[in-house]
Image (cartoon, rainbow, N blue to C red):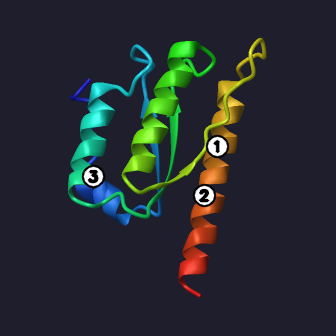
């Protein structure tokens, strides 16, 4: 996998107006790789006042929703403005693709609004 995927860098997070963090539903907690990246960014103060959102695999399962909630709490603790993740209701079919698009659009809209407010 490392041959196909370049790990995100500090510069990737520094220039971004908004960041979407994704995690696997690893036993209901943030994956170690994402956790290490968030801790690395946090130690450098990169996350303060940033706009972000969290998403994860298996969001319609208890492990998935717990992993997303864990990641969101972590990001809030580090001073980020977090767009809440819409999770399916119990028994509702999980239209992950559409929910992901809605979340992405919401993240962009929030980042634009905050950037515009800061420039006024």
Q: Position of residue 99 (x, y in %)?
A: 69, 34
Q: Which mark is residue 40?
A: none
Q: Quadrant of residue 79?
A: bottom left
- Report the Cα–Cα distance between label 2 and label 1: 9 Å
In this picture, residue 9 sits left or right of residue 106: left
Q: Is residue 108 above or below residue 33?
A: below
Residue under pointer 2 = 108
Residue in the image at 66% along x and 51% along y: 105
Residue in the image at 59% along x and 13% along y: 61
Q: Is residue 64 above or below residue 105?
A: above
First of labels 1, 3 by sequence position: 3
Q: Position of residue 73 (x, y in %)?
A: 46, 40
Q: Are marks 1 and 3 in contact (CB under 8 Å)?
A: no
Helix, strand or loop at label 2? It is helix
* Nearer the observer, 86 or 69: 69
Q: Position of residue 77 (x, y in %)?
A: 40, 48
Residue under pointer 3 = 42
Residue in the image at 51% along x and 23% along y: 66
In this picture, residue 115 sits left or right of residue 49: right
Q: Are marks 2 and 3 in contact (CB under 8 Å)?
A: no
Helix, strand or loop at label 3? It is helix
């Amino acid at each position: 996998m490392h041959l196909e995927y370049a790990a995100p860098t500090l510069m990737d997070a520094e220039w971004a107006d908004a960041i979407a963090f994704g995690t696997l539903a690893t036993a209901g907690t943030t994956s170690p790789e994402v956790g290490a990246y968030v801790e690395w960014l946090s130690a450098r103060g990169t996350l303060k006042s940033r706009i972000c959102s969290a998403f994860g695999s298996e969001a319609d399962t208890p492990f998935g929703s717990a992993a997303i909630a864990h990641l969101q709490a972590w990001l809030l603790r580090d001073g980020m403005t977090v767009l809440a993740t819409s999770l399916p209701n119990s028994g509702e079919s999980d239209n992950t693709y559409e929910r992901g698009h809605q979340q992405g659009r919401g993240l962009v809209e929030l980042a634009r609004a905050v950037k515009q407010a800061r420039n006024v």
